[in-house]
Image (cartoon, grey):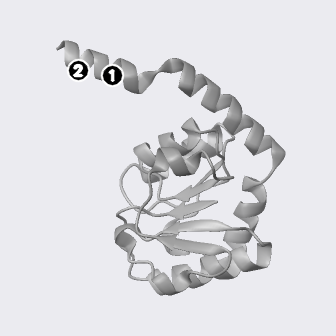
Amino acid sequence: MYIGFGRMPSTHAYRMASVIVEVLAATRIRAVLAKGWGSLPAEASTRDVHVVESAPHDWLFSRCSGVIHHGGAGMTHAGLRWGRPTLVCPVIGDQPFWGLMVERIRVGPSPIPLGRLNVDLLKAALRELQSKSLQDNAVALSKNIQMEGAAETAADLIEAA
């Protein structure tokens, strides 16, 4: 599982890290926890939680069972491109929209605003992320995304201009 909130600052980094570590220990799910600019503490590292400064998403997401993030358009695309069910924990801007879209197309549970993240909500969301139906839907969507070639098409259009 990948968990990271990108450049989203958090005044509650220690509380968030505590919730995440507690839930992962209780559910026996291993995860990579990206610090990003959110200043998640390195002390969150445990046997099952590996805290990193950053990681190449294309490489990492293809190896994860799911993705939990803030819901920026790029992060949402990156996780779904690799067919990973996604939980969006929005903070600002368009992030709530992407969280609702993920839920609407059934590739992730209902979004949980980052400020409301707690043990019970995260446990329930992790159970849902591991459901066969969400996994199957995410894989089916990824096949469509990969066939589309949107990034390559965009690059071609930009270079042709």
For this rendering, which residue is in front, 8 or 94?
8
Residue 145, compared with residue 115, is above or below; it is above
* Residue at x 55% of width, y 25% of height: 146
* Res. 76 visible in picture: no
Q: In the figure, is residue 125 to the left or right of 18? A: right
Residue 31 x %, y %: 63, 66
The image shows residue 62 at horizontal and vertical percentages of 60, 44
The residue at 78%/72% (across/down) is 27
Residue 157 seen in the current view:
yes
The residue shown at (54%, 51%) is 60
Residue 79: image x %, image y %? 55, 45
* Residue 158 marker: 2
| Residue 62 or residue 83, whichever sits in front | 62
Total numbered badges shown on the rendered structure: 2
Residue type at mark 2: give it: Ile
- Where is 62 relative to 27, above or below? above
Name the secondary structure under disc 2: helix
User: Which element type, helix, strand or loop, lies under badge 1?
Assistant: helix
